[in-house]
Image (cartoon, grey):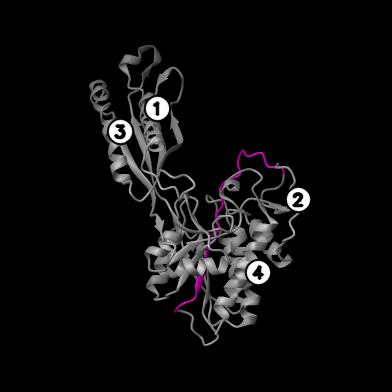
Amino acid sequence: MNAPAARSELSPSPASLDLIRKLVSFETTSRDSNLALIEWVKEYVERQGASTRLTFDDEQRKANLFVTFAAADGNARDGGVILSGHTDVVPVDGQPWDTDPFTATLRDDKLYGRGVTDMKSFSAIGLALVPEFLRRGLKRPLHFALSYDEEVGCIGVRRLVADVVREGIKPGACIVGEPTGMQLVVAHKAKESFRCRVRGHEAHSSLTPQGVNAVQIACAIVTFLTRMAERFRDGESRDEGYDVPYTTVHTGVMHGGTALNIVPRDCWFDFEFRHLPFDDPQALLAEVRAFAETFLPQMRAVSPDTGITFERLSNLPGLDTEGDTDIASLGRRLNASEDFGKVSFGTEAALFHNAGIPAIICGPGHIEQAHQPNEWVTLDQLARCEAFMRRLAQHLCAV
């Protein structure tokens, strides 16, 4: 675990810490249901006068929750702000945690637990301050959007956004609370992910020329992807506004083979492009396909049943909001800072933005702590998020 840091003079309220602990206690890994958390939040906000909408996945195991606190004049549809956050977290399997990952644990000035940074703290702080929003008297609606399966492709929020648009609800802005260190973010890269399947031909390993080794061919394609990544790293097509200022190529999962003495028939692997606006992912995929096809003649000379296929797993558009737009101006005002930046990770902000709801990103914690064992966020970051929310209350409650 990281060495203790000096205790910050800024700390969040006990109410915010209690809500963070509550949301972290729900084990909402993407492979599991999030319904227990959703039902708890639904009851919490309805007790305070909110209206709610649920949109489910096909199996009814997971749900998005869209919450609306209407303005004092009854307006629940036009204007106002959405606070958006995903409920799912990445697995803790095999990670060397020093504390229970689903019990938010405070040590010195850091709160540890799965999701404290990515990204339950943002939603929890907003929910904790609902009584303050209501006490001040809303002049514009306040919405919360809690979604499922963001970590596996921003899947759930697409249904939530479609439902909001279909119902004619027209929020004026959306703030996505992904971890940015409480810096305003106005742009992020797009992402396309794919699965490559190589079908070879089995043979005894002593007779390798009679087989087609799917693992070796897959590895050659992965090596080609690695060279593409190096080309972008060393090239001139860059945007220095991003933390990683060039398009990246990454292979994350590979499976193949059954035994060492069998030439493997099957191998598959997953890879992704996180690309800048001027790099076309379809052109990049076409490069990979063209390289893969060079193996086909020798493969099919052994067996006509061999082949290589590519399947898209997910896609997420990029966000590219200019710093001088109304939504960016709102973000700077709420953050009490003129600074803004860009990030390499994707968010649902682009999906809201493309649906006509201007979006920005700003949330507590840093992406470097996300997905790690002993995930943590500092109390200072949580306190800054609270201050952000209180400025939002001034904005929504001002005449």
Query: Considering the numbered disc 1 on the image, is that residue within a helix, a strand or a loop?
Result: helix
Residue position marked by numbered label 4 in the rendering = 128
Residue sticking out furthest to the bottom: 73
Q: Amino acid at mark 4?
A: Ala
Q: Amino acid at mark 3?
A: Ile
- Point out the stretch of residues depicted in magenta: 78-98
Q: Is residue 93 magenta?
A: yes
Residue position marked by numbered label 3 in the rendering = 308
Residue position marked by numbered label 1 in the rendering = 219
Residue sticking out furthest to the top: 206
Q: Which one is nearer the viewer's eye here, 85 or 329?
A: 329
Q: Are marks 4 and 3 in contact (CB under 8 Å)?
A: no
Tell me how far mark 4 sits from mark 3, CA to CA.
52 Å
Q: Are marks 2 and 3 in contact (CB under 8 Å)?
A: no
Tell me how far mark 1 sits from mark 3, CA to CA.
13 Å
- In primary-sequence order, the first of circles 2 and 3 is 2
Q: Amino acid at mark 1?
A: Cys
Tell me how far mark 4 sits from mark 2, CA to CA.
26 Å
